[in-house]
Amino acid sequence: MSNEQQGSGRARRVTIFDVAAASGVSRGTISRYLNGNGYVSETARQAIKDAVEEVGYVPNMAARSLATRQTKNIAFVVHESHNMFYNDPNLGGMLTAANRVLSDADFQLVILILDSEQTLGRIATHLRGGYVDGAILVSVRAEDPLLDIVQELGIPAAMAGRPAGQSSVPWVDVDNAAAARNISARLLGTGRKRIAMIEGPEAMRAAQERLVGFTAALGAGFDADLVLPTPDWGHESGFAAMQELLCRDPSIDGVFAACDALAIGAMDALREAGKSIPDDVGVVGFDDSLWAKRSFPGLSTVQQPVEEMGARMASMVLRQLNGEDLRHSHEIVPTSIVWRDSA
Amino acid sequence: MSNEQQGSGRARRVTIFDVAAASGVSRGTISRYLNGNGYVSETARQAIKDAVEEVGYVPNMAARSLATRQTKNIAFVVHESHNMFYNDPNLGGMLTAANRVLSDADFQLVILILDSEQTLGRIATHLRGGYVDGAILVSVRAEDPLLDIVQELGIPAAMAGRPAGQSSVPWVDVDNAAAARNISARLLGTGRKRIAMIEGPEAMRAAQERLVGFTAALGAGFDADLVLPTPDWGHESGFAAMQELLCRDPSIDGVFAACDALAIGAMDALREAGKSIPDDVGVVGFDDSLWAKRSFPGLSTVQQPVEEMGARMASMVLRQLNGEDLRHSHEIVPTSIVWRDSA
DNA sequence: CACGTTTGTGTGAACGCTCACATAGTTTGA
DNA sequence: TCAAACTATGTGAGCGTTCACACAAACGTG
């Protein structure tokens, strides 16, 4: 059934020479046929095709990479410590879309997980060692060493989210301010009078931008006392922030949380305080993560066009591979709102 | 700040020859130093170390792979269509653990997503083209072409879950029957009298095994009428199955669902039927997925030792790389129970 | 002190591919 | 009709490593 040699010694690999022998055509022509450049006659074409089939030839990537200096691999680097990898469907969407775009261009996406100093070194080696032709970076943190590495290497790259420091790596991000303004306006439209915002870590750009949108939406109804930053984006922080907000003003009837996890935490706190959602208080979030889908009641939130982002990052890398200079450029993609039952 | 050449032409790569020139030592010695085999004097060692630093040398993986016929890469192949990638924390745990084990052995994990016929072909090429030395397969489906490819190629591999057909690829799985028996017994221990099971797709081994455990736990209290298979593992199927079960016997006071999604669906159906959980009916699931954590009330379920599984698969691959013959072998790992509020 | 061992080093040939160049036949066009 | 294209093919060199082998020095040991 299987035709590989078993047992003693490693079987000699099938090489382009075998195809040459079987087809009666030279290496050069076969290479041209395989890579689709240069002239190959119809007869040769057919002979090669049959020979490839006959001997079971598969090109050796290492040899090809060595000769061409490219691998047809693109890295998708994920910070595991951000933990988004498992909880965040956004990441999955980006992955899928990027994978599709790259596949179409005959590139293979390889995902690298960054979860320790040791891994950082290995990934750096991976990138500069010529395993990949380009990189897509997601969940990049402020002052990320990865960013420096990619920049220094000068390999084609793209990242999700606006970088914290200055960096030449092109990025794609959503219009946080517009999204925040839209969903806040919609929450306002349900007749709420006292709307609070759980801001997220105030040092982070995304949090700041979302606050801008929130402020714009509320206009005169804005009250700085009802905006509370949190140390992180986590569920527990949302819980604590909501408790604090309720202390400040028990009459709060609407909450915009800067991410879904914060919103879920806030809902838990509200429930514990005896508030009903959405009757007493309307809650909206940001991200459209799994939590939003499975929370009770379903969380109204901002849906990020993650597929779009993934696809754009992929094509940014591809374009750079094609010689375009995309340094310092960026793209902003629009969001939409998913309205469920929490407001 | 950055020292790479900009602009015209591609910069010549730094090779082992540059290190040789800078250190006054030959290629051979440098190679021995880098790979840690053979003799290298302390003086040479130091000189090489300095030279590597000085010229900024990083070994070229393609060249190394070509010469050694190995890549130090292990593939982690995921069926995207199973959609577990995004929803299932189990997968994330396996990934992390496998990554850790492989990193320690100086291997790099690369994740490949299988989401179409086209991708299948590409991945097959990737595997046989010599991009990786081995593969870890998760969410393998019955009659998976991937399994055939891996087997035919004869590359070191390991998979999660007992394969449906016969296959020589070693696998790791949980003791489904024991886990099902344990959690069913525990549910029984809460004083339930009429316990139903939502079995899952009855053609699937995991479903069958869990049924065996369930039957064993119930003993004389078992009633075949209260076991219902479903067409798939989805939430909607759980909902429908629960409705059917309630028709058959409205006095049901306990439900064991063969996976969390089914359990969540069942809970929704129970709620709709006016039953309170856990007072009227106790519900338990299987998997400890995100759904279980965020459901309301929190779902009591079986926790799979995913890290353990990931680590074991990784070391299975490593051991095969080391020459061990693991074909037709397998390992069973024990589960634990996470008791929340749904029963 | 001659001889085997251990320690250390350099060199040529792979590894399997692509690319540039050389060569040659076959069309075109003035 | 002869040169300038276009079409088609083969060949040698090179991509950057490792590995086997040859060699050489230093070190016991009988």
Image: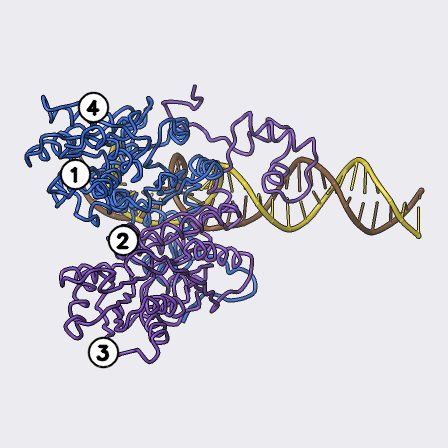
Chain colours: A blue, B purple, C brown, D yellow
User: Mark 3 highlights which residue?
Assistant: B225
- Whether residue B118 is visible to the viewer of this picture, yes or no, is no
Specify the subunit that label 3 lies on. Answer: B
- Which image quarter is the C terminus of chain B in? bottom left
Percent from the top left, x then y, of residue A321?
Answer: 31, 34
Percent from the top left, x then y, of residue B329?
Answer: 48, 68
Query: Alpha-carbon neighbours of circle 1 within 10 Å: few (<14), some, or many (≥20)?
Result: many
Tell which circle, 1 or 4, labels the residue nearer the N-terminal end.
4
Percent from the top left, x then y, of residue A152?
Answer: 41, 26
User: Mark 4 highlights which residue?
Assistant: A225
- Determine if marks 4 and 2 fall on one subunit: no
Residue nearest the viewer, comparing A30 with B8: B8
Amino acid type of the residue tagged 2 in the rendering: Trp
Specify the subunit that label 2 lies on. Answer: B
- Whether residue B51 is visible to the viewer of this picture, yes or no, is yes
Write down the quadrant of residue B140 in the picture. Answer: bottom left
User: Mark 1 highlights which residue?
Assistant: A283
Which-is-in-front pick, marks 1 and 4? Answer: 4
